[in-house]
Image: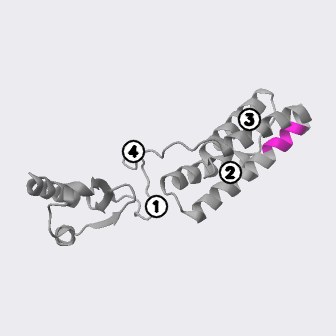
């Protein structure tokens, strides 16, 4: 997997260095870096989302092209080539484990503003009818690859659901 997070960090460093050299950075490049960083974070949390990865890659490649062009024009070919090597190393560096989704503020596929919680499947194994319990509290759920179930809906309903799970589990 390509490490878009590391590449965005290196591009951010390059942008800061260029600013310190009093080189003007076009606002669309700054905006594209923010966009690329956002999509990179989402792609890391939602592995396999090809469309999200493509958006991260497109935004970051646009930033890379613009910043390296500015670096070459304003600071020289050798300077730009050095940064290009750093960027390539960042893209190919080891991808760290994604942050816990509970720490993330946004999960793809969950409507904005909806309260959510992740529950380990092993805690729910003693409950015979999870679907009925979710229906009772008008909640939705998604199974995740890491052994968790994502439960989402109104905050009060999620709290009541968790209370019921605690009662049932003991």
State the image coordinates of residue 9 (x, y, percent, origin top left): 64, 38
Camera-nearest residue between 164 and 111: 164
Whichever of callouts 3 and 2 sits on the residue coming sooner in the sequence is 3
Q: Secondary structure at mark 2?
A: helix
Q: Residue at x 44, y 54 (%)?
A: 106
> Separation of disc 2 and disc 1 at Cα?
20 Å
Task: Using the rendered image of the protein, determine whether residue 142 is visible from the camera's viewpoint.
Answer: yes
Left or right of residue 80: residue 11: left
Determine whether the residue tagged by mark 1 lies in a helix, strand or loop: loop
Q: CA distance from mark 4 to mark 1?
A: 14 Å
- Mark 4 against mark 2, which lies toward the viewer? 4
Q: Which residue is denoted by mark 2 in the rendering?
A: 32
Checking the image for residue 108, the label placed there is: 1
* Nearest to N terminus: mark 1 or mark 3: 3
User: In the rendered image, which residue does mark 4 sit on?
Assistant: 103
Question: According to the image, label 3 marks what residue?
Answer: 14
In this view, the mark in front (2 or 1)? 1
Q: Are marks 1 and 3 in contact (CB under 8 Å)?
A: no
Q: Is residue 72 left or right of residue 5?
A: right
Frontmost residue, 45 versus 11: 45
Seen in the picture, residue 94 relative to 141 is either above or below; the reply is above
Q: Residue at x 88, y 38 (%)?
A: 72
Instruction: Name, please, the residue furthest toward the top.
Output: 20
> Magenta part of the protein: which range?
67-72
Quarter of image, res 78: top right
Q: Nearer the viewer, mark 3 or mark 2?
A: 3
| Pointer 4 or 1: first along the chain | 4
First in sequence: mark 3 vs mark 4 = 3
């Amino acid at each position: 997997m390509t490490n878009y997070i590391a590449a965005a960090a290196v591009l951010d460093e390059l942008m800061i260095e260029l600013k310190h050299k009093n080189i003007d950075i076009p606002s669309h490049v700054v905006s594209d870096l923010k966009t690329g960083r956002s999509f990179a974070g989402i792609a890391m949390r939602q592995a396999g989302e090809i469309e999200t990865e493509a958006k991260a890659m497109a935004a970051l490649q646009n930033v890379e092209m613009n910043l390296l062009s500015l670096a070459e024009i304003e600071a020289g070919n050798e300077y730009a080539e050095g940064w290009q090597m750093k960027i390539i190393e960042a893209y190919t560096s080891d991808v760290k484990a994604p942050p816990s989704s509970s720490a993330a503020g946004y999960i793809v596929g969950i409507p904005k503003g909806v309260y959510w919680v992740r529950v380990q499947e092993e805690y729910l194994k003693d409950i015979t009818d999870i679907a009925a319990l979710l229906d009772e509290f008008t909640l939705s759920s998604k199974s995740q690859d890491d052994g968790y179930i994502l439960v989402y809906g109104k905050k009060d309903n999620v709290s009541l659901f968790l209370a019921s799970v605690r009662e049932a589990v003991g």
